[in-house]
Amino acid sequence: MNDQRWGAALSAAREAADAAAEVIRHYWQRGVDIEIKSDATPVTIADREAEQAIRAILAPVLPDAAIYGEEFGLDGRRDGLLWLVDPLDGTKSFVRRTPFFSTQIALMDKGELVLGVSSAPIYGETMWASAGDGAWLNGERVQVASTSEMAQASISTGNVKTLTSDARWQALGALIRDSNRIRGYGDFCHYHLLARGGLDLVIESDVNILDIAPLAVIVREAGGVFTDLQGQPLTLDTRSVLAGTHAIHAQALQRLSLPTVGSGPG
């Protein structure tokens, strides 16, 4: 059923994504210096200013909500209303002048993801969704495909380094051989494609919840399934993704759930 509780919050998240897009476009045109964070990933002034713009819009809308951002960390408690923000997911693409980066904003209510906005300003797509209200691409409602046979399925992989180190790598190879085609769109792009029917399965073994939280809401509201690689619901500690149509997700989960697989982060 439609859940009207999140209407104002969703509007604010969309406004915040638009504000971040203005920052990102500015620096996309003029260029930026690159810094390397302690985890060896790059960061730029565009990341920081975009998150500041987002926080300024979100904070007054739900005064009791905490905000957990990629660049400025957690402000508040994790266990109630919690905004999840990655202002520029795909900084490596941004600095290499490829358009596969986005702003990701989600809201979690007591551990349940209830809305998400995924904005890719240079690529030219914005998707959003809230609990019970469907998934939308640039203002048009979208749905996942009806694909039910692996032989007809299109699969996309993203970050899969961890997966390559255990028995799932062989299982993934067999899955690919039995599928219709394999691609590696990565980042926001393959989740957008999944939600609007252009793909049937997305697999990643090395992600952060801030990268995927809004996309999980979008795929779910488009009629798909979005779990980790063990088939478990997402939490703040989730590190992997198995997302797809109901039938293809179920088949992939069965094939990737091997007794010889280790219990690492993937």
Image (cartoon, grey):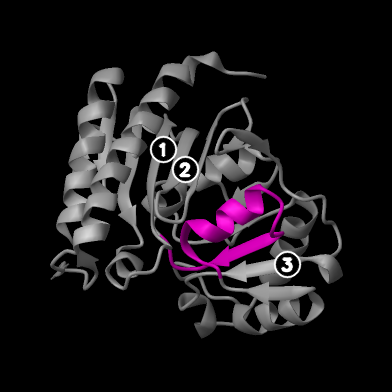
Identify the magenta region.
185-207
* Label 1 or label 2, whichever comes before in sequence order: 1
x 43%, y 63%: residue: 100
- For image coordinates 60% across by 49% down, the residue present is 226
Q: Are marks 1 and 2 in contact (CB under 8 Å)?
A: yes
Give above or below for 70 relative to 204. above
**Residue 21: x %, y % from top left:** 32, 44
Query: Disc 3 marks which amino acid?
Result: Ser
Q: Nearer the viewer, mark 3 or mark 1?
A: 3
Q: Which residue is mark 1?
A: 106
Q: Of the numbered discs in the image, which one, if any, rests on residue 214?
A: 2
Tell me the amino acid under the disc marked 2: Pro
The answer to whether one can see residue 70 in this image is: no
Q: Earlier in the sequence, mark 2 or mark 3?
A: 3
The numbered mark at residue 154 is 3
**Eyeballing the image, is 233 above or below 43?**
above
Residue 197 inside the magenta-drawn segment: yes
| 159 to the left or right of 54 | right
Q: Give me the C-alpha separation between circle 1 and circle 2.
A: 5 Å
Residue type (three-letter) at the residue carrying disc 1: Ala
Q: Extreme top residue here? A: 4
The crowding category of the residue bearing disc 3, from other C-alpha atoms within 10 Å (few below 14, some 14 to 19, many at least 20), is many
